[in-house]
């Protein structure tokens, strides 16, 4: 296949970043106008017609010097804390309309379609709260470590932040990510199918350091409970094995203190494990000799299996990937070269390979992996594609270092049925229609 950029393919960015229904409608209208003009003027006029779509967004005459070339700019520190460009204001975390009844017990999704590389900016990290978020005074916050330990202790933030710290890059994915898609296609865009997913550098102290300081019985004490300080009293059991491995008690995210929405001033980081175990506003750690059977692990966060039983105590986020661009709601403005880009991750370790199909799963090519490949972190992949203008389906399939392969949706349903909410790691399919519009579809 010829993959040299000839006519650079362009994706209409602002409307699909916003993803509000009215703007998606506008994008479709712009596309129709473009198609109409292109048809009316014949093939030779295609580039000019496409140009007019852009020109509508601002005067782009290269010979006219704009004000920003001929005048003085803003002074330094006009904003003590930097903000994105006004031109990027459509890129927002958003609630999926109608998903929950109360906004304090809800989710806002990360706009994956508008992000690059592997790191999620703090202001766009998804949020999942069971009882709203709080901005807790760090001087009053305490962490108690107790249970099967010799010297139970209460730590202040100052106590914790003078301990040996580590910084690690990891993804966090809500177990319910892509959960709406178990039955049928439910939502239009990658923001809503996969946006309960983020990846940050976390800084904090290893949980094993704290367990060591209090003299935890790590032989008989096979389990650890983590409890949050918000009204939902989020409580989850993790195994002592995980607690002694890579679990962290973190206060920082991407180089600054945690944001209040993400658990300021302290949260648990449980690499590879579903988001619910990453307890925010962390206030208590208890060591015990059996699982704690809390509401958040035996009633909630369970999956209804085809035989009528409930799967409980699920934790690992299995190998998964998704193409973030082109993706649902975006519009390809013309034929030609495109860089297909996406994310792959596995709760079991590193990503080994990502394959991409541009023909609905008949043929697969291995994608380029860009940037660092870290254990239990998002991994960016890219692959060249020349769109010939005919309808097709784009898919990605990830394989991790343990040999796990991302399944097709029908393979997953054969084992798990259609009544689950959690742990849907199926291959995502995006249909590119002949108008260039991209839709969420399921391919078996
Ligand atoms: N204290 C507390 N911790 C919590 C929650 C919560 O509601 N309260 N939600 C959990 C769930 S279900 C997820 S997916 C993650 C989301 O983390 P985030 O809001 O930083 O994205 O936090 C987890 N930790
Ligand atoms: Mo979650």
Image (cartoon, rainbow, N blue to C red):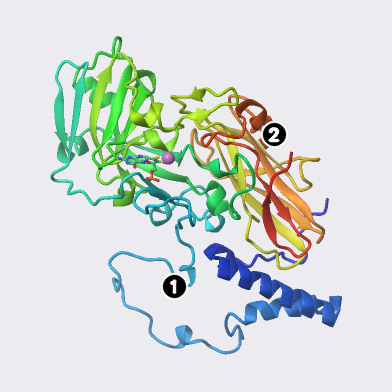
Q: Nearer the viewer, mark 2 or mark 1?
A: 2
Label for residue 410?
A: 2
Q: Splitting the image into 4 quarters, where does residue 165 fall?
A: top left
Which residue lies at the image location 65% right of the left edge and 31% below the top edge?
Answer: 413
- Residue 379 visible to an observer of this rendering: no
Quadrant of the image where one finds ligand 1: top left
> Is 274 left, or right, of 440 in this rendering?
left
Q: Nearer the viewer, residue 277 or 65?
A: 277
Tell which residue pokes out farthest to the front in this image. 308
* Alpha carbon distance from label 2 to label 1: 43 Å
Q: Splitting the image into 4 quarters, where does residue 308 fall?
A: top right
Q: Position of residue 221 (x, y in %)?
A: 29, 14
Q: Nearer the viewer, residue 147 or 72?
A: 147
Choose the circle earlier in sequence order: 2 or 1: 1
Q: Position of residue 147 (x, y in %)?
A: 21, 19
> SS at mark 2?
helix
């Amino acid at each position: 296949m010829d993959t040299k950029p000839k006519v650079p393919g362009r994706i209409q960015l602002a409307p699909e970043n916003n993803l509000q229904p009215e703007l998606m409608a506008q994008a479709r209208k712009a596309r129709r106008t473009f198609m109409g003009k292109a048809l009316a003027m014949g093939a030779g006029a295609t580039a000019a017609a496409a140009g007019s779509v852009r020109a509508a967004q601002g005067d782009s005459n290269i010979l006219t010097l704009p004000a920003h070339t001929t005048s003085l700019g803003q002074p330094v520190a006009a904003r003590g804390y930097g903000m994105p460009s006004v031109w990027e204001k459509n890129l927002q975390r958003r609630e999926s309309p109608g998903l929950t009844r109360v906004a304090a017990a809800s989710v806002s999704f990360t706009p994956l379609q508008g992000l690059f590389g592997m790191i999620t900016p703090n202001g766009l990290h998804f949020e999942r709260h069971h009882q709203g978020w709080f901005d807790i005074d760090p001087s009053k916050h305490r962490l108690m470590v107790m249970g099967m330990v010799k010297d139970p202790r209460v730590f202040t933030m100052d106590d914790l932040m003078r301990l040996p710290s580590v910084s690690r890059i990891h993804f966090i994915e809500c177990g319910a990510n892509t959960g709406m898609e178990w039955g049928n296609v439910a939502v239009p865009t990658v923001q809503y199918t996969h946006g309960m997913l983020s990846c940050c550098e976390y800084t904090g102290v290893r949980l094993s350091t704290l367990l060591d300081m209090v003299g935890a019985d790590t032989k008989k004490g096979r389990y650890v409970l983590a409890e949050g300080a918000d009204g939902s009293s989020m409580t989850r059991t993790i195994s002592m094995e995980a607690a002694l491995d890579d679990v962290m008690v973190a206060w920082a995210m991407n180089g600054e203190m945690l944001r209040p929405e993400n658990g300021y001033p302290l949260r648990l980081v449980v690499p590879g494990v579903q988001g619910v175990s990453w307890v925010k506003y962390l206030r208590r750690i208890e060591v015990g000799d059996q699982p704690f059977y809390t509401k958040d692990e035996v009633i909630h966060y369970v999956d209804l299996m085809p035989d009528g039983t409930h799967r409980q105590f699920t934790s690992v986020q299995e190998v998964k990937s998704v193409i973030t661009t082109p993706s649902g709601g975006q519009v390809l403005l013309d034929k030609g070269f495109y860089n297909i880009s996406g994310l792959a991750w596995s709760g079991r370790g590193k990503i080994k390979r990502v394959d991409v199909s541009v023909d609905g799963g008949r043929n697969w090519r291995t994608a380029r992996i860009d940037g660092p490949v870290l254990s239990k972190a998002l991994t960016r992949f890219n692959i060249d594609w020349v769109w010939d203008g005919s309808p097709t389906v784009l898919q990605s399939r990830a394989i991790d270092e343990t040999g796990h392969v991302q399944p097709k949706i029908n393979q997953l349903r054969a084992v798990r049925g259609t009544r689950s909410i959690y742990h849907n790691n199926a291959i995502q399919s995006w249909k590119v229609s002949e108008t260039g519009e991209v839709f969420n579809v399921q391919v078996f």
